[in-house]
Amino acid sequence: MVVSVSPAASDVGLAVLKRHGNAVDAAVATALALAVTFPEAGNIGGGGFMMVWPGGGQEPVCVDYRETAPASAVRDMFVDDKDQHSHKTAGVPGTVRGLALAHKRFGRLPWKDLVLPAVALAEQGFAVDEAVAKGLNAIAAKSTTAAEFRRVYQKPDGGSLAIGDGLVQPDLAATLRLLADGGPDAFYRGRIAEQIVAEMRAGGGILTAADLAGYEAKIRTPVHGTFRGFDIYGPPPPSSGGTCVVEMLNILENFDLRRQGRFAPETVHLAIEAMRRAYCDRARYLGDPDFVDVPNHLTTKEYARKLAAGIHLARATPSVEVAPDVQLAAEGESTTHFSIVDADGMAVANTYTLQDSFGARIVVRGAGFLLNNEMTDFNWRPGHTDRRGAIGTAANQIVSGKRMLSSQSPTLVARDGKLVLVTGCPGGRTIPNTVLCVLLNVLEFDMDARAAVDAPRLHHQWLPDRVQFEGADRPEYAPLVERLRAMGHDVADKTRKQGDAHTIRVTTEGLEGAADSRRTEAKAAGY
Ligand code: DON
């Protein structure tokens, strides 16, 4: 089964599974298809994290293909620069090396067979749905968007896209064909690298041929935690995802949430307090482990017990009391996650991104793909701390070659060595909290995948000291919101949808796929 935001990409993955490709083969093909059919976040010019459950008793691994800062990047390069979509905001892309590394380690089918379905989608075109058409038209309409974006993503006569129009991408087809034939070196050392460098020269970017040639994806040991006898595996730094999710679950394990009920004020209060504390630690400590020492107590049960003991059961702890001295930087709009389980029980949870929707909004001239603006995930104004956002901690400041801190949280859950759940989502800093909500719904409240994904979600990120709750404007939750406010929580009136968590739950009867209905076009494809 493959669950992704794009029906065409889910179908590409499904076809690979039916040809006896494994979950990693399907993940490579799905990711490359998404780069064609979901340009706002599907990508070859960005990066992400792939969690692999190999099955057969082997330990899960994380493929870290996060972007890196170019060699000439320096700590203060954005201090006086407000442009979040410039050539300078592009990190060295990791996606192609990441997919190739996962394939080399686990794949079964030839690489080329996994790239060609994406070539076909780019060459023959696909019918754009409402979300894709709207997204592309909105960016194309901005006066700052370069002509190349309009040429590639609008109609040949320059007109905007309507629902159902075919989008043909000949430049991207040619790029993908180079990848099919030449493997990742075509991207990092060959013609595509030359095109990226030419784009950088033309646009005042700093990414060089040496940056591309030197990029490495890494196999990392996942963060591992437990919750009520379930094993939880998530990405380690440079993502904050696994650490935050495990820290929050560890705190909540100290309370009997099941007895209280899923949307009892007491349960929601404790979830908010767990979020507040974990996100404070995220800001304070987390960064690229190849550059900073990340303390290892954050995911221990003992530390969580201490934090749990500090939670007042009937009153919100003001975030400034948790830590008055640190602040966070801004994060973006769009990412995408897909989940895959194959017939032999191998599974993939993959989240990847361009950072903002359509990344830097810069199409590499002649190559037909978008560059990320992931450099904006670093803390931009070192040393400066204010209550509204931006900057602070040293752990996530820019250093040449360093990976910027992420929130991506592709997550695997097992029990007694057997896979139970595959999930993850987009949503910038809301990501670990969305994953926490889905995990609690399944692991603590016994919901099936559909109910767990549909239930309204919650977000608190330490600062600003405010709760977002998807149900805040629904009458049935009015008493809950009122109670939370009485406890001292600032619950926002306006609700914001949290990211689409395309999820697979493994049951004794088979696989339950839940394409998140927050994106109506998403599809679970299985056989
Ligand atoms: O890596 C990160 O955490 C961010 N760049 C992700 C951005 C994101 O999820 C935007 N999504 N809706």
Image (spheres, rainbow, N blue to C red):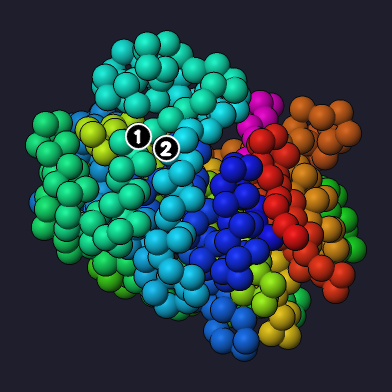
When the figure is inspected, residue 20 is found, relative to residue 330, above or below; the finding is below
For the point 62% across and 50% down, the residue is 11
When the figure is inspected, residue 346 is found, relative to residue 162, above or below; the finding is below
Q: CA distance from mark 1 to mark 2?
A: 6 Å
* Magenta highlight range: 492-499
Q: Secondary structure at mark 1?
A: helix
Write down the quadrant of residue 521 in the picture. Answer: top right
Q: Tag on residue 123?
A: 2
Q: Give the camera-side residue of 388 and 110.
A: 110
- Marks 1/2 in contact by CB < 8 Å: the verdict is yes
| Left or right, residue 512 beside residue 458 | right
Q: Tag on residue 170?
A: 1
| Left or right, residue 362 beside residue 111 | left
Q: Give the camera-side residue of 132 and 421.
A: 132
For the point 43% across and 53% down, the residue is 116
Q: Label 1 crowding class (10 Å Cα cut-off): few <14, some 14-19, many 20+?
A: many
Which amino acid type is shown beneath numbered disc 1? Pro
Instruction: Give the percent coordinates (x, y) of residue 258.
Output: 86, 63
Q: Tag on residue 49?
A: none
Instruction: Give the percent coordinates (x, y) of residue 149.
Output: 32, 25
Look at the image and tell me whether residue 373 can be seen: no
Write down the quadrant of residue 365 in the picture. Answer: top left
Instruction: Give the percent coordinates (x, y) of residue 150.
Output: 34, 20
